[in-house]
Image (cartoon, rainbow, N blue to C red):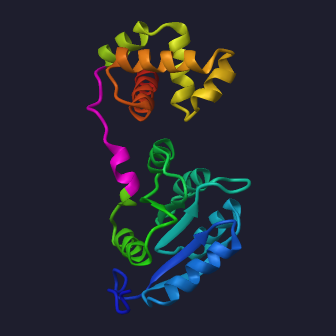
Amino acid sequence: MTTSPAPGRDGTPIRLVVVDDHALFRKGIGQLLSMYGDIHVVAEATSGAEGIEAVLTHRPDVALVDLHMKGLDGISVIRALQSAGSTTRLVMLTVSDSSFDVMEALKAGASGYLLKDMEPDDFCLKLRQVAAGGTVLSAEVGGLLAKPQPPSRESINEGWVSLTAREQETLELVSKGASNKIVARSLGIAESTVKVHVKHVLQKLNLRNRFEAAVWLRELREEERGA
């Protein structure tokens, strides 16, 4: 472990707020960072609402925000802080390596997405990088952000029209992160049928996976709002 890391961007320790509804995890973060010396936890929050108040009150350099919390989830916390004009660098810290969660967090305004099983030295390095203005990702989720070139308005419209009504319904649900089982239950069809619909959607739209399908649908919705 590195015991004499570089200090914060202005020579002072990096000020950190931890927003997580698990007390043991919050305490663990504090104990870990106390071993380094250049990152100080200035406040802890046990819920999303408390997290918003803590960040706006203490105005730390970085805030770690858990994704899944009772009440306000991490995405909602980040959106609220962005709307409030907070300049704190917001980092999602979670166990979820879902491509949909990664995309939603970054779209909401997160400056990073880190997994809770990171090695301590790497974790602290990422905190220093984000405090210095960078965007940080755990290695396991970095590859999920590969995105195809944005399609043209014409190709988007043509692609949507090429789908059957049931394929469109399937795509809507898949883009929200629904599993095949949940899609099947929502549409009242067999799970095997859902797999066929997903396969056809990807083939017709020339996409590689569900993540790209979610990005594609977002492009469609943005085109509709801009029309």
* Residue ranking furthest to the right: 71
| Residue 29 is inside the magenta segment | no
**As drawn, 131 above or below 33:** above
* Residue ranking furthest to the front: 192
* Residue ranking furthest to the left: 149
Give the quarter of the image for residue 199: top left
Q: Position of residue 108 (x, y in %)?
A: 49, 48
Q: Quadrant of the image for the N terminus?
A: bottom left
Taking the spot 51% from the left edge, 63% from the top edge, the residue there is: 86
**As drawn, 92 above or below 13:** above
Give the quarter of the image for residue 31: bottom right
Taking the spot 52% from the left edge, 77% from the top edge, the residue there is: 16
Give the quarter of the image for residue 218: top left
Q: Position of residue 9 (x, y in %)?
A: 34, 80
Taking the spot 42% from the left edge, 23% from the top edge, the residue there is: 220
Q: Nearer the viewer, residue 6 or 35?
A: 35
Q: Nearer the viewer, residue 173 or 153?
A: 173
Query: What are the residue bounds of the magenta stretch?
Result: 140-152
Taking the spot 54% from the left edge, 23% from the top edge, the residue there is: 172
Q: Position of residue 204 (x, y in %)?
A: 36, 14
**As drawn, 213 above or below 84:** above
How many numbered marks, from 0 up? 0
Q: Nearer the viewer, residue 103 or 143?
A: 143
Q: Position of residue 208 (x, y in %)?
A: 34, 29
Q: Quadrant of the image for the C terminus?
A: top left
